[in-house]
Image (cartoon, rainbow, N blue to C red):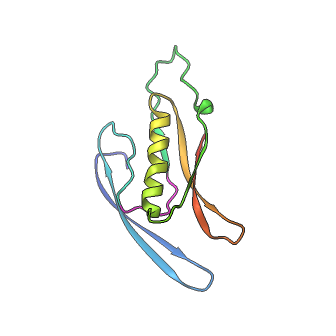
């Protein structure tokens, strides 16, 4: 996706029992834009990144000082809203800094999704 435009994407997941799920997404790319989360995203874990626009003479700020944060699923709050909250935290935390961040699905001991963990590279 090196050019501005609209890109349709289909994600296909298949489990060991042969169950198949498909999710269609549309990615909107514009010149010089940062990644934005699509309204109907659920449990994807894309990377949000901010390009390094600092000159070579200056050392880019490190994302090491940014704190990882947990976003638990809450009653009456959709998983999508929790995901958006996590992605917003990443985008805000990386503003003016170089680095990348992920919203990673967190499971309990039984494999049940219980939230997202914002982590930074």
| Total numbered badges shown on the rendered structure | 0
Q: Quadrant of the C terminus?
A: top right
The quadrant where residue 67 appears: top right
Q: Residue at the spot x=34%, y=39% of the render?
A: 33
Q: Nearer the viewer, residue 89 or 7?
A: 89
Task: Name the spot of residue 47 as percent of width and height, x first.
Answer: 51, 48
Task: Name the spot of residue 3 as percent of width and height, x first.
Answer: 31, 46
Q: Residue at the spot x=43%, y=26% of the render?
A: 53
Task: Name the spot of residue 38 as percent of width and height, x first.
Answer: 36, 56
Q: Residue at the spot x=50%, y=63% of the render?
A: 43
Q: How would you classify the magenta stretch by its main secondary structure?
A: loop
8 horizontally vs 82: left or right: left
- In the displayed orientation, state which residue is furthest to the front: 75
Q: Which residues are magenta?
A: 40-46
38 horizontally vs 67: left or right: left
- In the displayed orientation, state which residue is furthest to the right: 109
Task: Name the spot of residue 111 as percent of width and height, x first.
Answer: 66, 70
Magenta stretch: includes residue 43: yes
Q: Up-down: is 11 above or below 86?
A: below
- In the displayed orientation, state which residue is furthest to the bottom: 17
57 horizontally vs 25: left or right: right
Q: Residue at the spot x=44%, y=65% of the render?
A: 76
Q: Nearer the viewer, residue 75 or 51?
A: 75
Magenta stretch: includes residue 5: no
């Amino acid at each position: 996706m090196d050019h501005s435009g609209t890109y349709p994407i289909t994600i296909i997941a298949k489990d060991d029992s042969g169950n198949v799920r498909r999710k269609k997404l549309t990615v909107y790319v514009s010149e010089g834009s940062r990644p934005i989360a699509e309204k109907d995203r659920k449990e994807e874990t894309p990377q949000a990144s901010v390009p390094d626009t600092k000159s070579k003479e200056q050392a880019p700020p490190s994302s090491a000082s940014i704190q990882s944060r947990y976003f638990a699923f809450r009653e009456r709050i959709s998983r999508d809203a929790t995901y958006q909250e996590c992605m917003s935290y990443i985008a805000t935390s990386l503003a003016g800094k170089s680095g990348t961040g992920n919203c990673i699905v967190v499971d309990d001991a039984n494999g049940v999704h219980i939230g997202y963990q914002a982590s930074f590279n």
